[in-house]
Image (tube, rainbow, N blue to C red):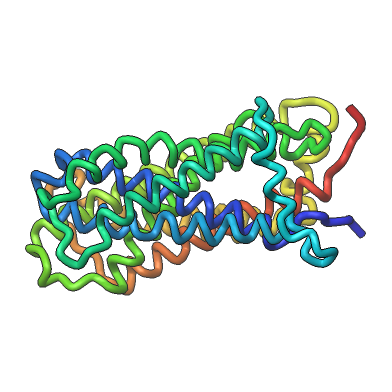
Amino acid sequence: MHELNWGLPVILYLFLGGMGAGAGAVSASIFLRSGGGDLAGSNFRFARWGALLAPVLVILGTGMIVLELGSFQTGHYFRFINLFRTINLSPMSIGSWVLALFILVSLAYAYTFLRPDAAPGDALQTLRKKLAWAMVPLGLAVALYTGVLLGAMPARPFWNSPILAMLFMVSALSTGVAAILLVRALFAHRGIISPENFERHSYMLSSSDMLLIGLEVVVIFLFLMFGHLTVGNVKTAMSVILGGEMSALFWFGFVLLGLVLPGLIEMKYVLPTLLYQRPFAIPRRMEVAICVLVLVGGFMLRYVVVIAGQMTGPVGI
């Protein structure tokens, strides 16, 4: 029996925090690519969904880790504040401050989109642009931080990989795009903007997600190759997903359901537009299914990594 000190709260923190950071970075990127929202109103609406999702998801995820660190069972409700009492170069200290700064900036960024009449060129446009420039690097930093935090633990050989941070960052961007598309598919009213612009920007996000899934497959390959080619404890630890106890969850729950299946479905709808300039059209049910599969894959990745890392350590250093 393996002793698991980190369970669902930590997994949800890594999942929700990464997805929120990805949604925030993608939202700001969409907004800035449209000239700060001045060029196309449809871009503004896509950016708005991501802006409103980002702080909610990250705050929920942070609440999970605070619950884990607070030792509520023993009455230590505010132990997490110790993370901010000292500033040093440890991943935990740097990450805590980056996370806090992202929450503050994302709340302000979301506020600029909150009014029902928010639109390009309104009174908050200048502030919105400045915050968008900050959201991109902060979102990427938070997404990277979750992988750096685990990868900086040499006593846990499964986590001790320089590729883990890149894997978590790409997954965060992919789940962030999926979250925006899911909100669009469930709650958007096409009458608000022209169908042509609506589908054009839906295509932009769907094609971006397809490319991110492809990149994630490459990073997974590098992650597995690093573990396989590294001698000693790291190679032994990787066996838990290469035929070991977590292999079914990793290959079926993450790789097949979370990467291969949604990637192939998206290719079916994206490639005709990409290669032959045909109008992009995807059934709403299919778009919801793709997004759900990507989100399930993102959760399964964190679940497998967190649990496998505890099953294969600690070791002496």
Residue 186, x across and y down, in percent: 31, 73
User: In terms of image quadrants, where is residue 116?
Assistant: bottom left
Q: Nearer the viewer, residue 159 or 104?
A: 104
Residue 217 placement, left or right of 269: right
Residue at the image point whose x is 45% and y is 38% from the top: 140
Of residues 19 and 251, the one drawn nearer to the viewer in this rendering:
19
**Image point (34%, 46%), residue name:** 26
| Residue 249 point in image, percent of width and height | 67, 59
Residue at left 74%, top 52%?
Answer: 79
Q: Is residue 313 visible?
A: yes
Q: Quadrant of residue 149?
A: top right
Q: Quadrant of residue 250?
A: bottom right
Please state the total of marks drawn on the protein image: 0
Q: Is residue 142 above or below residue 124?
A: above
Measuring from the top left, give residue 184's x and y in whole percent.
Answer: 28, 65
The structure residue drawn at horizontal position 81% and vertical position 64%, both measured from the top left corner, is: 75
Quick check: 59 above or below 30?
below
Residue 259: x and y in percent read: 49, 53
Q: Is residue 116 left or right of residue 177?
A: left
| Residue 279 appears in view | no
| Quadrant where the N terminus is found in the figure | bottom right
Q: Quadrant of the C terminus?
A: top right
